[in-house]
Image (cartoon, helix red, strand yellow):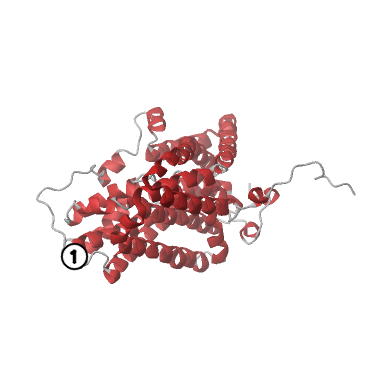
Amino acid sequence: MTNNTVGQKQPGFWGKMPLWQKIFIGMGLGVLAGVFLGPDAEFLKPIGTLFVNAIKMLIVPLIFCSLVVGVTSMEDSRKMGRIGAKSVVLYLGTTAVAITIGLVFGSVFAPGMGLNMVANETSTVVKEAPTLVQTFLNLIPKNPVNALAAGNILQIIVFALGLGIALNLCGEKAKPAVAVFESLAEAMYKLTELVMKLAPYGVFGLMAWVSGKYGIEVLLPLIKVIAVVYLGCVVHVIVVYAGLIGTIGRLNPVRYLKALLNPAAVAFTTTSSSGTLPATIKASREELGVSKGVASFVLPLGATINMDGTALYQGVCALFIAQAFGIDLDMADYLLIIMTSTLASIGTAGVPGAGLIMLSLVLTTVGLPIEGLAIVAGIDRILDMARTSVNVCGDLMVSALVGKSENELDESIYNKEGYSKETNVA
């Protein structure tokens, strides 16, 4: 019997290691390098910047092509509307639950109690968050080319949905155009696979810079609020997401949690839901068995409107700031925070730092000192890592539940420990 592997170079230890393990090794080495080098670790930041830029390069064409392919694969327009409705209800519902958890944890652990800070007469000026009306008015792009060039995700989604629906209505005449978009989408998936091979090195550079810039000493005064946010995020993923997978989806929650490893690791280090989209789509299709049509439609939508982690963070930080300045909030304020954060999540970009814009909107709405934003901004990067990971975990949960409800989830792939391309869903 001939051994076909003779003469072929076998992958070494590093080559055989799963991507998420490589990413965490890069993260750990980055932290050690940052602690050792201190502020001088900034010279390693360009390594991470190159990786982030490569990820950003994928976002617009991947979202656009994925959505067009997702819509055209659903020739039944009623089915597309049904899937969209299910997705939006799940996304907004879990966002409301997430901010409630944040408010409860903020009340129980009281991270800002005893700081006794005093607000200045003038508030810090921050970028104004868009109102809900402005968000809806800006949904339709005046120029779709400009929207694509500017990376306006909401407008890109609307245009892609409209184009996909139009292609379906054109019937046979649109088949060549549909084939082009399917080819482009497959090319983007392959380019994504190549870019993700750089993730461990990019993560090393990013983490070295973060740990070198902030240091352990700077984090100590705010360690409690960081711990509360991280605890809330873990509880939300394990209790809410895994619970919904088990109760509504009747699926094994452990398999879902295992599938989170790669995308959650990427989200944790890049702090971008949109930037993690390539890894999220890959995990949804190859590890959870969600069909290409559902994954390509639900996940780009979730990268834009699903902000569970950000909402949870807002609940904790709003109470932290209220406690730090000695301001008491009543039940009406809590309900206003929940409503504002849930609706604002629709128009918040899934990019690093977007949570601060949403937080400024919440503080202004409830009447809390805007100066509190400056306190949180110092540790925003660390908090952003956790909240982005939760956002991505929520995207995967919704894709699995919607796929299962539409009979477009291959349970032989979902329940399989390993993955082979031969068993991938179409």
Image point (55%, 42%), residue name: 198
Image point (48%, 48%), residue name: 299
Amino acid type of the residue that numbered disc 1 sits on in the rendered structure? Leu
- Residue at the front extreme? 36
Q: Residues within 10 Å of mark 1 (few under 14, many from 20)?
A: some
- Residue at the left extreme? 121
User: In this view of the protein, can residue 77 be seen by the observer?
Assistant: no
Q: Secondary structure at mark 1?
A: loop
Q: Residue 373 location, x and y as percent?
A: 23, 51
Return the residue nearer the eye: 334 or 44.
Answer: 44
User: In this view of the protein, can residue 214 be seen by the observer?
Assistant: yes
How many numbered circles does the render carry? 1
Return the residue nearer the eye: 326 or 137.
Answer: 326
Image point (34%, 39%), residue name: 139
Q: Residue 328 location, x and y as percent?
A: 16, 66
Q: Residue 331 location, x and y as percent?
A: 21, 67
For residue 120, side relative to residue 331 (left or right): left
Q: Is residue 383 above or below residue 278?
A: below
Q: Residue 349 location, x and y as percent?
A: 36, 44
For residue 359, side relative to residue 282 (left or right): left
Q: Which residue in the structure is indicated by mark 1?
A: 329
Q: Is residue 304 above or below residue 222?
A: above
Name the quadrant containing residue 341: bottom left
Image point (36%, 33%), residue name: 141
- Residue at the bottom extreme? 108
Return the residue nearer the eye: 210 or 369.
Answer: 210
